[in-house]
Amino acid sequence: MGAADIIRTIVQEFPLALYGSILVGIVCAFLGVYIVARRVVFLGAVLTQVSVMGLALTFLPFFPVPHTVGSLGITLVTVVIISRLLTGKKIPRDGVLGVVFITSIASRILILQKAQRVEVAEIENLLRGDILFVTPELFVLMVVAFVVAMVLHLLFFKEFTYTSFDPETAQTQGFNAAGWDLAFYLIAAVVIAFATHMVGDLFVFGFLVVPPVTAMLLTRNVKAIFILSVVIGALAPIAGLFLAFVIDVPASPAIVAVATVVMGGAWLWSVIPSRRPR
């Protein structure tokens, strides 16, 4: 199969996989800039695992709610608790996130033991990130979450950016840092819950981290970091899907691999003395 045939196959037979992966790549790359700046990178991994655990709960007979509702509800409740603990002084941030992370994984494993075999297989497909079979319903939900998240962040760009990149100064100038932190975490929770349900935890966590780090290797300008991160988030899924078809490998790992290769190139570029980010 030639390159033109592969592109035609992707566009005609898997359009939602293509557009969905681009959509998730963009929104996760954008939110990831804040997450990396806040030094809570592990938060992305934690919320993806919480989302999957919430989804797993919906497969149990005594938790009869739609999968997306269960995943979103558990993620939102967890993020409210996490946001309070992260601003506390008694427990280090890494400790808080580590406890939630391992608890979510342990809970998911126990839940899977009580789910029916066919349902276990469905959850495992989600964990592998089988993005080639994105449903129209999930795609629409992701579009809505994307639009809401982007509108809120563009309306309050100054507040979110200030409290993420310079929280001490923001607080001294009267910004309600705790309130903006909670708002950010809630928006991130909604996006991550829908995105994880649609494309899997590997893809979501990868794009919450790799594109922002790549952008930060290339520039120190805040707006440029956002732009570069979003561009990578949009283009890497296209190249990754094409690569997955060419060498016959799973789509999500291929997409993350492409983004990682770009990050490696950015790092090599940044270590050249005359090319260090400005």
Image (cartoon, rainbow, N blue to C red):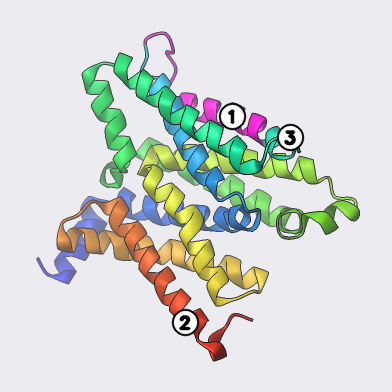
Image location (x, y in percent) of residue 11: 26, 58
Residue 186, by quadrant, is: top right
Image location (x, y in percent) of residue 208: 50, 53
Q: Amino acid at mark 3?
A: Lys
The range drawn in magenta is 61-82
Q: Is residue 15 visible?
A: no
Q: Is residue 16 left or right of residue 250?
A: right
In the image shown, does 220 or 132 lie closer to the viewer? 220
Q: Which residue is mark 1?
A: 78
Q: Which residue is mark 3?
A: 90
Image location (x, y in percent) of residue 141: 47, 38
Residue 243, by quadrant, is: bottom left
Q: Examine the rendered structure and indicate whether residue 218 appears above or below residue 232.
A: below
The residues bearing labels 2 and 3 have C-alpha atoms spaced at a distance of: 40 Å
Q: Amino acid at mark 2?
A: Trp
Q: Amino acid at mark 1?
A: Thr
| Numbered disc 3: secondary structure | loop
Of the image marks 2 and 1, the number of the one nearer the N terminus = 1
Q: Which residue is mark 2?
A: 269
